[in-house]
């Protein structure tokens, strides 16, 4: 019953949103974000705690300033998602560097021989980024965890929206068979590098100077299929506006070691370092509410 009520609530809210101007939607998005991350709330305290872990050299005032900007970014994200799901988002007009971004996409197409593995993260607006690539002729497949929050919303709202751009979503469990076919067809796969994946599927790496678990999958796929590993980011410059950043493919395969597990760890570390460096440039763009260091508390205490 709860699942159905939530589904119809979301559908009704999306319907009503069609009547509202964009400026009102962005204002509502910010209002909702400040309700969710109200100063003093559990979520706000978690954001501050994680900022303190990542940037121990910054003052409390600096952490609070980043947290405030993070909340405003979340508000913009909420409004952008509503506009996307209701067909009111102008993807072309949202890009500040369209010529540069499209040129980079064409370069990737020309280099693509064994498929592409996109290094994505909960940074900026990852949904926008996926649709921008699809409109540029590179729809992809997202490898994700099984949806457990509300399957009705996922199956009847989110997935039809993604399929409309040519995307597919496969569950992480049993995804290898699908991925092998995708690479063979010279298509792309997107994988989040910033999710906490414990052993045996995860490996211990360093993230902002603290131990964290990360998925082995990207390194394993690079070693097995040799796709282009391409870090991509959509950095928000204003509500509904982004700079699309497409990095050079990462060819690193840890040649300094022959040990298979160490090779995977070093490669995963390299991928995580790329994300960390991007976050340092624009710290308010990342999802600080996410429990990135979960499961490693005892390791920190023993140091």
Image (cartoon, rainbow, N blue to C red):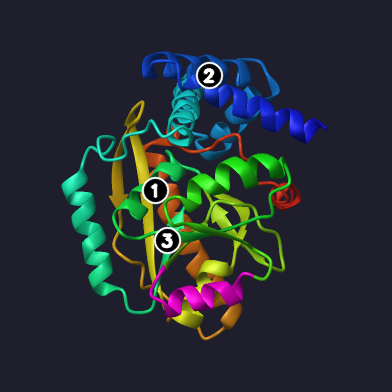
Locate residue 36, reporting x and y percent.
62, 21
Locate residue 272, reporting x and y percent.
48, 56
Locate residue 42, reporting x and y percent.
70, 23
Q: Answer whether labels 2 and 1 touch (C-beta < 8 Å).
A: no
Quadrant holding the N terminus: top right
Label 2: few (<14), some (14–19) or many (≥20) C-alpha neighbours in 10 Å: few
Find out whether residue 148 is within the magenta segment: no
Residue wearing tag 2: 16
Could you tell me how far apart the alpha carbons at marks 3 and 1 are, in whole angstroms?
A: 13 Å
Relative placement, left or right, of 2 versus 35 is right
Q: Answer whether labels 3 and 1 touch (C-beta < 8 Å).
A: no
| Label whose residue precedes the other's in the sequence (2 or 1) | 2
Could you tell me how far apart the alpha carbons at marks 3 and 2 are, in whole angstroms?
A: 35 Å
Q: Magenta region: which residues?
A: 175-187
Residue wearing tag 1: 131
| Label whose residue precedes the other's in the sequence (3 or 1) | 3
| Label whose residue precedes the other's in the sequence (3 or 2) | 2
């Amino acid at each position: 019953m709860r699942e159905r009520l939530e589904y119809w609530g979301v559908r009704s809210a999306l319907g009503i949103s069609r009547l509202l101007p964009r400026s009102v939607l962005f204002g509502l998005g910010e209002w909702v974000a400040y309700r969710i991350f109200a100063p003093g709330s559990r979520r706000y305290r978690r954001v501050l705690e994680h900022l303190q872990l990542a940037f121990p050299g910054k003052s409390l005032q600096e952490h609070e300033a980043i947290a405030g900007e993070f909340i405003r970014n979340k508000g913009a994200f909420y409004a952008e998602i509503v506009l996307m799901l209701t067909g009111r988002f102008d993807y072309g007009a949202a890009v500040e560097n369209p010529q540069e971004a499209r040129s980079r996409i064409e370069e990737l197409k020309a280099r693509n021989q064994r498929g592409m593995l996109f290094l994505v993260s909960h940074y900026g607006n990852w949904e926008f980024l996926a649709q921008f690539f699809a409109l540029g002729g590179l729809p992809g497949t997202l490898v994700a965890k099984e949806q457990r929050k509300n399957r009705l919303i996922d199956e009847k709202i989110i997935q039809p929206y993604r399929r409309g751009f040519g995307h597919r979503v496969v569950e992480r469990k049993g995804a290898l068979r699908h991925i092998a076919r995708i690479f063979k067809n010279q298509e792309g796969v997107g994988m989040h590098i910033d999710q906490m994946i414990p052993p045996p599927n995860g490996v211990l790496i360093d993230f902002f100077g603290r131990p964290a678990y990360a998925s082995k999958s990207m390194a394993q796929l690079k070693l097995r299929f040799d796709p282009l590993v391409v870090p991509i980011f959509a950095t928000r410059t204003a509500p509904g506006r982004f700079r699309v950043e497409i990095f050079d493919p990462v060819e690193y395969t840890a040649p300094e070691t022959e040990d298979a597990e160490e090779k995977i760890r070093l490669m995963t570390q390299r991928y995580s370092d790329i994300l960390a460096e991007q976050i340092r440039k624009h710290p308010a763009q990342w999802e600080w509410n996410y429990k990135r260091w979960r499961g490693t508390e005892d390791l920190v205490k023993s140091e």
